[in-house]
Image (cartoon, helix red, strand yellow):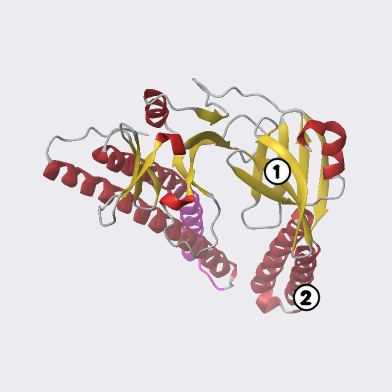
Amino acid sequence: MKEIPIPAGAEARRKQQRTLARTRKALGILTFVLAAAAILSLIGLLVTVIVLEMRGNTLDEQATLYLCTGIFAAGAAALAFAAFGCGKLSQEATRTELDYRERCDGEESFFVGEGTLFTFGEEGAVLHAESEEKKPVSVPYGDLKFYSVCRRTKPREKGEWSVVIELPSHYVVKDKSRDVPPVVRIQAEGKARLYRAIAAHALTLGGEQPPQGKAERKEFSLRTKFLLPDRDRRRHALIFAAVAAAAVVAGVLIAVFWQEMLTIGVIVAVFGLFFAGRSIISFVRAKGMIAFYEEGVYWREGGRAIDERIFLKWEDIEHVSLQEAQGKRYLTLACAYGNYNLPDVAGAYEYIAANRQEKV
């Protein structure tokens, strides 16, 4: 992330912020346009292939169609790569803009939510809105706890670092009639400036400490794993697979017995094969998995468009217990900064009790 120098004057700061916001928005729009253009190129490729397969095209028309096929295919690939790269630049521009807005408020200010800043002071921290519309909340350092957290989605050292800040709920929840937990937790992006601020105020940072340099590429050691099939998702996958198989059969019959519709039959059969393959993959992936490594616990819930994945090191887990809610049992992994509730996969709790007795 690039740090933008903070101008001296207030107007110059606002101007720079507007420039960064325009850059972020422009990159976001460009990413959308490139992705849409890639999809349109794929549609153009499909239409060109259909027209090419139709009888009655002259040699010049066929040459033009072949040229268009190559242009659409190359354009779709190039535009897809460009959209991916532009998306990465858009994410970086967002982080750069947020960091700039933080430092405009103060070198020791950090976003902990949408428009909410956490600023280190002499005797305590201040929670306040960026727009200063709401009254700021001061919290003494004695009532604050800081935890360093690494969110890992794979069993490896690399992950996204953040700092979880715990404070008594009465500082931020004024409605006494509400049933609220005794503490609330807010989160800030783990960055060198934040770690320096915590150290400068002689505050204790618990949890796993971030590496000084680049994270080592270490392979974790798998011990065993347990699977939890998702019957509902598997049933849906089988239904879609059956429909896709019917489309394949229909496409083949059209291509064989209806020569005038040969191209259409082939396209229907190809799409049917594609969706049948996707359905089979969905059926196979429609299961949860809890795996135990020498270094920690890995959970993956498959079958979704975006799988839920989490890896917790044994050092982060204070204890493990079985909980029950709404007729379902959960495996609760309690950490200092919060709990993780995983489905009770058969055999998982027994494995922990036998191999990690100190955690039960």
**Residue 198 falls left or right of residue 207:** left
Majority secondary structure of magenta residues: helix
In this view, 79 is above or below 351? below
Which residue is situated farthest in the top direction here?
Answer: 212
| Element on which disc 2 rests | helix
Taking the spot 65% from the left edge, 31% from the top edge, the residue there is: 156
The spot of residue 133 in percent (x, y) is: 25, 57
The spot of residue 287 in percent (x, y) is: 77, 54
Q: Earlier in the sequence, mark 2 or mark 1?
A: 2
In this view, 273 is above or below 55? above
Q: Nearer the viewer, residue 234 or 317?
A: 317
Q: Nearer the viewer, residue 118 or 93?
A: 118
| Element on which disc 1 rests | strand
In the rendered image, the quadrant that contains the N terminus is top left
Residue 333's label in the rendered image is 1
The spot of residue 356 in percent (x, y) is: 81, 32
The spot of residue 257 in percent (x, y) is: 77, 78
Residue 253's label in the rendered image is 2
Q: Which residues are magenta?
A: 56-80
